[in-house]
């Protein structure tokens, strides 16, 4: 491949240094920009909280002032029913008090009181149908400010006993607590007004409910408060939201006042739900600050919500970014000039190293021409020498592997010497694979030969001996025996075949089901393996004779959950797992052959018995036929004699009668 000027060390080092400088500059500029942005946002959060708290304080102050008016008036009216020092107030005086309070407090839209039947003066009947009273005579005056006529007008309360519309009366009567009614649209005079109602119950000395005193505040008073101040140059949008999610007032769109916040901003509805603490968050590229307002003794909570676009808060970010970018470019150009100078100065030794590296790259490991002019070059020289030695060593190891010698291993210089580690791991894998393949081959060949032997089965004794002899020789064991079940008046195990040192033993031996290791293996139907046996141990517990092996394995001869015997093999060496697995497979196959032979013997015996029975029946049939023929002849003789006797009798009778 032909290289151009862009592939020189000078260019690459310059490029890397330049790239690092650019990356560093971008990171620094980005970091500073990020910090500046976060600083501006954090400052905006604090400012937004201050604005929201100020709004909350002013709104709470206005609401609390209206509540104080309701509270004080309720206390005065409650004294009317006091048992100790009752105050004498008639309906006209009470109505006048309410009217004057509306007149004096210009922020109030209206004020009212409503009493239970006969609770005010126990004289409702006298006021039935009269002005300033309920049609049934209840005392329910309402004075309100008419901004069109600039007068304080009167009308009796409506719907105060109707659930929903009359919650301003029904809720305090039920809870006996101060209540802030969420904003509702209410017709006052000829105008629909969005108003907030602040209600205090009137209670007697026994805390019995007598009635209420309430004050109304129009949302317009809160709207004036919002529009009196500009937040973030008018980009900050302020919303006052009531306990039930109604928008009381907003600084940017009067048409949404009275609507539910869930219709305008569903996410805010979820954020303010049961929120009792000040919080700020950024979502949809907007900073939102929420401050709760809790009024008096009521449990109602309103919220001041300020939303400000993030773009406005960081509007100065671009100019700062331009300044930082310009400084970064100047720094980059200066660094490139300095780097070029030092690169030229230090490149000469690298050229010499390049020539050596080229020779090493083509496999020439016998050359070494680098002159150690500096400490760095000397270290590089030593490193190259180590690389060459390592490659020579790896070459020797791989050559041995190709010849099937897995005994050699590469020397690992460090934990990061991946090549040597990989070569050694490859040797282990090849060695393991070879051993496993040899085991598989040994197992498969042995099993195939064993299966072929069992194909030529004749009888149980001969087949057992052939199978036992093969297994002992193939496993390099020493001796063994095959014990099969026999049944007379009891079930017991009988030695059908034994093999010791390539000589067959014809000694008959019977073992009870619960006797020794053989009986235990048969009874438990589990493989038994014993190692490190003491001297003469086998003579006591085994039926294998007088040998003293170090390893005994007993396997139940089981086929289809039916155990027909036990095979016992002894050896001076311990069997590896793969040999035990091989033995299990062979015994399983042998068990099926034993089962088939037993079934064949049983069938043959039954057939012989049937044939003998048939011969006996044939002989009995012949004898019976002869007896029948003899009886028939005898009967014929008796019949003839009887006829003769009758004829003689008749002749005698004739003579007697004649």
Image: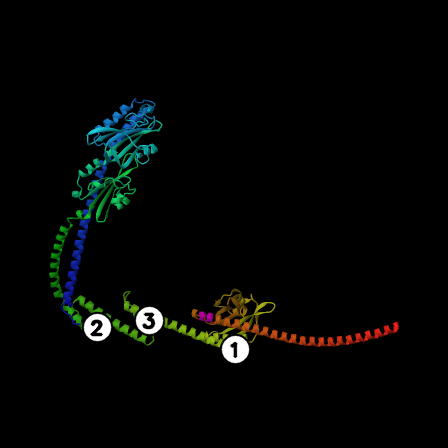
Indicate which disc, 1 or 3, sits on the residue closer to the N terminus: 3
Point out residue 398 in the picture as x, y percentages from the top left corner. Answer: 30, 74
Check if mark 3's residue and mark 2's residue have beta carbons within 8 Å.
Answer: no
Q: Nearer the viewer, mark 1 or mark 2?
A: 2
Q: Is residue 392 magenta?
A: no
Residue underneath mark 3: 427
Left or right, 67 with respect to 658, comes to: left
Depth order, front residue of 236/548: 236
| Dominant secondary-structure state across the stretch colored magenta | helix
Q: Is residue 492 visible?
A: yes
Q: Position of residue 542 (x, y in %)?
A: 53, 69
N-term-proximal mark, 3 vs 2: 2
| Residue 538 spot, x, y in % from top left | 52, 70
Depicted 601 relative to depicted 345: above or below: below
| Nearer-N-terminus badge (1/2) | 2
Look at the picture and state if 435 lies above or below 310: below
233 lies left or right of 569: left
**Residue 209 appears in which quarter of the rendering?**
top left
Residue picked out by circle 1: 503
* Mark 1 Cα-neighbour bin, 10 Å: few <14, some 14–19, many ≥20: few
Q: CA distance from mark 3 to mark 2?
A: 26 Å
In the image, 553 versus 235, the foreground residue is 235
Question: What's the colour scheme?
Answer: rainbow
The residue where tag 2 is placed is 361
Q: Is residue 548 above or below residue 54?
A: below
> What residue range appears in magenta?
579-585
Query: Which picture quadrant has residue 540?
Result: bottom right
**Local secondary structure at mark 2:** helix
């Amino acid at each position: 491949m032909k290289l151009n000027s862009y592939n020189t060390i000078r260019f690459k080092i310059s490029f890397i240094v330049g790239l690092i400088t650019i990356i560093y500059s971008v990171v620094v500029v980005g970091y500073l920009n990020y910090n500046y942005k976060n600083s501006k946002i954090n400052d905006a959060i604090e400012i937004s909280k201050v604005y929201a708290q100020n709004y909350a304080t002013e709104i709470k102050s206005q609401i609390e002032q209206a509540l104080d008016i309701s509270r004080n008036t309720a206390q005065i009216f409650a004294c009317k029913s006091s048992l100790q020092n009752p105050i004498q107030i008639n309906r006209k005086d009470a109505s006048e008090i309410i009217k004057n309070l509306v007149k004096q407090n210009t922020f109030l839209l209206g004020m009212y009181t409503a009493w239970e039947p006969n609770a005010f003066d126990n004289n409702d009947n006298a006021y039935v149908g009269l002005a300033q009273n309920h049609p049934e005579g209840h005392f329910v005056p309402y004075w309100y400010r008419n901004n069109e006529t600039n007068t304080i007008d009167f009308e009796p309360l409506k719907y105060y006993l109707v659930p929903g519309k009359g919650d301003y009366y029904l809720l305090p009567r039920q809870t006996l607590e101060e209540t802030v009614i969420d904003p509702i649209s209410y017709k006052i005079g000829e105008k629909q007004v969005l108003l907030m109602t602040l209600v205090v119950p009137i209670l007697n000395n026994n805390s019995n409910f007598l009635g209420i005193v309430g004050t109304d505040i129009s949302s317009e008073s809160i709207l004036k408060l919002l529009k009196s101040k500009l937040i973030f140059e008018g980009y900050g949008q302020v919303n006052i939201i009531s306990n039930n999610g109604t928008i009381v007032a907003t600084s940017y769109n009067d048409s949404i006042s009275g609507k539910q916040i869930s219709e305008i901003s569903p996410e805010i509805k979820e954020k303010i739900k049961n929120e009792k603490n000040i919080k700020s968050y950024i979502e949809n590229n907007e900073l939102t600050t929420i401050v709760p307002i809790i009024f008096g003794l009521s449990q109602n909570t309103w919220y001041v919500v300020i939303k400000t676009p993030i773009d406005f808060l960081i509007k100065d970010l671009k100019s700062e970014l331009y300044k930082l970018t310009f400084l970064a470019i100047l720094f980059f150009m200066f660094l490139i000039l300095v780097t070029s100078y030092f690169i030229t100065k230090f490149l000469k030794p690298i050229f010499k190293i390049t020539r050596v590296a080229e020779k090493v790259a083509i496999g020439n490991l016998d050359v070494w021409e680098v002159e150690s002019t500096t400490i760095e070059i000397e270290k590089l020289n030593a490193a190259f020498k180590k690389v060459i030695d390592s490659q020579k060593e790896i070459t020797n190891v791989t050559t041995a592997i190709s010849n099937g010698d897995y005994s050699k291993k590469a020397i690992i210089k460090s934990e990061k010497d991946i090549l040597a580690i990989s070569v050694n791991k490859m040797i282990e894998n090849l060695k393991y694979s070879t051993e496993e393949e040899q085991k598989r081959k040994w197992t498969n060949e042995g099993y195939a030969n064993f299966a072929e032997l069992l194909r030529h089965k004749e009888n149980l004794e001969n087949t057992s001996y052939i199978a036992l002899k093969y297994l002992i020789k193939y496993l390099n064991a020493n001796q063994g025996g095959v014990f099969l079940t026999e049944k007379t008046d009891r079930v017991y195990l009988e030695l059908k075949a034994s093999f010791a040192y390539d000589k067959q033993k014809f000694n008959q031996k019977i073992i009870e089901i619960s006797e020794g290791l053989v009986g235990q293996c048969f009874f438990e139907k589990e493989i038994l393996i014993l190692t490190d046996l003491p001297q003469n141990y086998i003579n006591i517990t085994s039926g294998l004779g007088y040998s003293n092996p170090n390893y005994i394995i007993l396997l139940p001869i089981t086929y289809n959950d039916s155990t027909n015997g036990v095979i016992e093999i002894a050896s001076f060496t311990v069997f590896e797992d793969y040999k035990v697995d091989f033995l299990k497979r062979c015994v399983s196959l042998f068990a099926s052959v034993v089962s088939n032979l037993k079934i064949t013997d049983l069938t043959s015996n039954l057939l012989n018995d049937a044939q003998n029975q048939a011969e006996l029946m044939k002989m009995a049939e012949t004898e019976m036929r002869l007896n029948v023929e003899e009886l028939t002849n005898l009967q014929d003789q008796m019949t003839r004699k009887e006829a003769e006797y009758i004829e003689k009798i008749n002749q005698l009778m004739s003579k007697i009668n004649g």
